[in-house]
Image: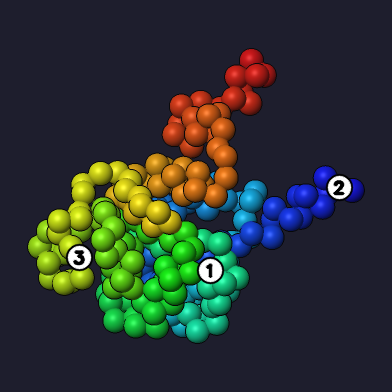
Amino acid sequence: MENMTGANEKIRKKGLLFIFEGYCEFEIAPAISMLRNSHELYTFSVEKNPCRSEAGLMTMPDMSVDEVDPMEFDLLIIPGGDLGPIAKADALFELVGKFGAFNKITAAICSGVFVLARAGLLKDTPYTITLSKEQRLFLDCFDEELFSYRPVVSKGNVLTAQGHAYVEFGIALNKMVKEISCEKEDFYRGKGNVFMEQVQ
């Protein structure tokens, strides 16, 4: 009974995933897959309407941005994708700013880092993003001196990553909330499956 209680306590942690029209699902697949044993994952969008991902998957969000209470969640994940649908989503930026103010873990990958910038979470914070210098200057919300072209960049509770580094992004995010075994890291990096090695 005690073991069951402990398991239930662990699963009470909640993670939040932002989705939008054209979001890139593969960029967050390792991250959310690794979280499944420790967090309940919820999705939200600007409005509570179905969102079609970059690859064509239709996803119905659990909540709209107005229904999210940041205090209920331990972490927030923002994928990349076409920024057009969210370029002026002020309610989203305000919400993400609250996650930062409450010192919640906030992670974004690829162009999704734009949301962190617009929310004010990258002030005095090093970051990476999969946008060219011209694009960053055009968007006018990035400090060029803090940009670094590295797979993953983190400071405090803010994590950013290049789109191609989606596995490292997932591992880094999960290490911020729990211990990750070497075997699990190897599995997600495609180095091997400890289960198969045991049954040979």
Circle 2 Cα neighbour tier, 10 Å, few/some/many (<14 / 14–19 / ≥20) = few
Q: From this viewpoint, is residue 24 visible?
A: no
State the CA–CA distance, disc 1 to disc 3.
27 Å
Residue drawn at the location 15% of the way across and 56% of the way down: 145
Query: Seen in the image, is 177 located left or right of residue 142?
Result: right
Residue drawn at the location 25% of the way across and 44% of the way down: 150
Observer-side mark, 1 or 2, equals 2
Where, by quadrant of the figure, is residue 183 drawn? top right
The tag earlier along the polypeptide, 1 or 3, is: 1
Residue drawn at the location 56% of the way across and 62% of the way down: 74
Residues at discs 3 and 2 in contact (Cβ within 8 Å): no
Mark 2 falls on what kind of element?
Answer: helix
Image coordinates of residue 196 in percent, x first then y, are: 61, 23
Q: Which residue is mark 3?
A: 142
Amino acid on which the number 3 mark rests in the picture? Phe
Reply above or below: 39 against 119.
Answer: above
Amino acid on which the number 2 mark rests in the picture? Glu
Mark 1 falls on what kind of element?
Answer: strand
Q: Which residue is mark 1?
A: 43
State the CA–CA distance, disc 3 to disc 2.
49 Å
Image coordinates of residue 85 in percent, x first then y, are: 32, 77
Q: Which residue is mark 2?
A: 2
Amino acid on which the number 1 mark rests in the picture? Thr
